[in-house]
Amino acid sequence: MMPPRFPVTSDQIDIVVADFYARVRSDAVLGPIFAAHVTDWTAHEGRIAAFWRNAILYDRGYEGSPMMAHRRAGDVRPDHFPRWLALFETALHARLPVEVAAAWSALAHRIGAGLRMGVADRADGPPSLR
């Protein structure tokens, strides 16, 4: 079994995810986008917490493709990601020790950069091979 990327518990992951989505729901830009796609917030938060447990604790309880989910949504734009990350960082720093929040934030920024590029590729259409 691999050690966690940084010291955080499963309960702390749940707390951060719940805090983040409370902030998302009240955000003027991201709130309506998420509301258009999420009908069961408890299930969604559980799925995202499972994603983070997989990414941080190497708990293999998550199945899915965040890239495909964001691309399929159709209304997620690259310029949404800085706002997403700002809300996420606020939740991290509100709920975790500084060092753990910084480590998780760095991971979220790496993941967010990949998702942002994937959404941008979708927005530009398929690559031209000519």
Image: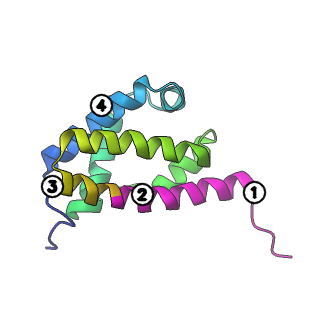
Judging depth in this view, the residue of 102 and 74 nearest the camera is: 102
Among numbered discs 1 and 2, the one appearing first in the sequence: 2
Which residue is under mark 3? Answer: 8
Secondary structure beneath dot 1 equals loop
Q: Is residue 57 visible?
A: yes
Mark 2 to mark 3 CA distance (whole Å): 17 Å
Amino acid type at image mark 3: Val
Among numbered discs 2 and 3, the one appearing first in the sequence: 3
- The answer to whether residue 96 is left or right of residue 49 is left
115 drawn magenta: yes
Amino acid type at image mark 1: Gly
Please give the name of the residue rendered at 62% of the width and 44% of the height, measured from the top-left corner.
77
Mark 2 to mark 4 CA distance (whole Å): 24 Å
Q: Quadrant of residue 16?
A: top left
Q: Position of residue 126 (x, y in %)?
A: 75, 62
Please give the label number shown on residue 109: 2
Which residue is under mark 1? Answer: 125
